[in-house]
Amino acid sequence: MESAGQLRARDRDALHVPLADLETTMPKYIIEREIPNAGALSAAELKAISQKSCDVLKELGPSIQWVQSYVTEDKITCVYIAPNAEIIREHARRGGFPADRVLEIATIIDPATAEWNELAPAAS
């Protein structure tokens, strides 16, 4: 079984486009999957879900990439890079898991954003 990193490297090589370029040219999405008791899923169940997801991603081709997911009490929230929301919904349909909300990320901020915002006027 290939790791997520190996899958990304293989898909990147197939396109001959650096992953960093894909991340800057293609939108990122947050996918909310309502799954009762998701936080209680066993390691084996999470592995099976991950394997199914990777199998479907291989079918869909390199234009859609799973970045990572966060498992909480009753939800799995995923980050994907994809050309559009429709391919994400198709991934969910083929995989047999929900995609209750598919939200395009408009902007990403982090603690460095606070520093950048404070320094930006001084650079003007």
Image (cartoon, helix red, strand yellow):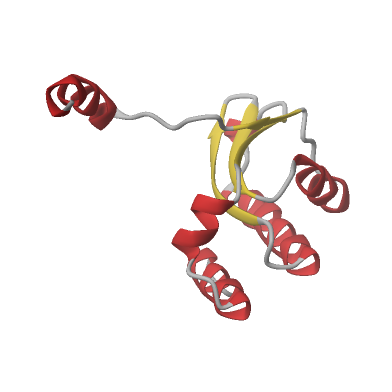
Q: Is residue 110 above or below residue 79?
A: above
In the rendered view, does 75 fall on the left or right side of 61? left
Give left or right: position of 15 versus 93. Answer: left
Question: Residue sitting at 61 percent across and 73 percent down?
Answer: 11
Residue 1 showing in the rendered view? no
Image quarter (top left, top right, bottom left or bottom right) of the C terminus: top left
Decide which of 78, 44 is in the foreground and name it.
Answer: 78
Residue 63 visible in the picture: yes
**Picture quadrant of residue 14:** bottom right
Q: Position of residue 78 (x, y in %)?
A: 60, 40
Q: From what the image shows, is residue 3 above or below residue 77?
A: below
Q: Which image quarter: residue 106?
A: top right
Residue in the foreground of this view, choosing between 41 and 102: 102
Q: Quadrant of the N terminus?
A: bottom right
x, y percentage for residue 80?
A: 61, 47
**Is residue 18 depicted above or below 101 in this figure?**
below
| 93 relative to 101 in the view: left or right | right
User: Residue at 62% across / 75% down in the picture?
Assistant: 15
- The image shows residue 57 at horizontal and vertical percentages of 72, 62
Q: Tell me what residue is drawn at x 26 percent, y 27 percent.
A: 111
Q: Work out which residue is located at the far left of the displayed protein and give it.
A: 122
Vertical position of residue 3 compared to residue 87: above or below: below
Q: Nearer the viewer, residue 106 or 60?
A: 106
The number of callouts visible is: 0
Residue 89 image offset from top left, x and y in percent: 81, 42
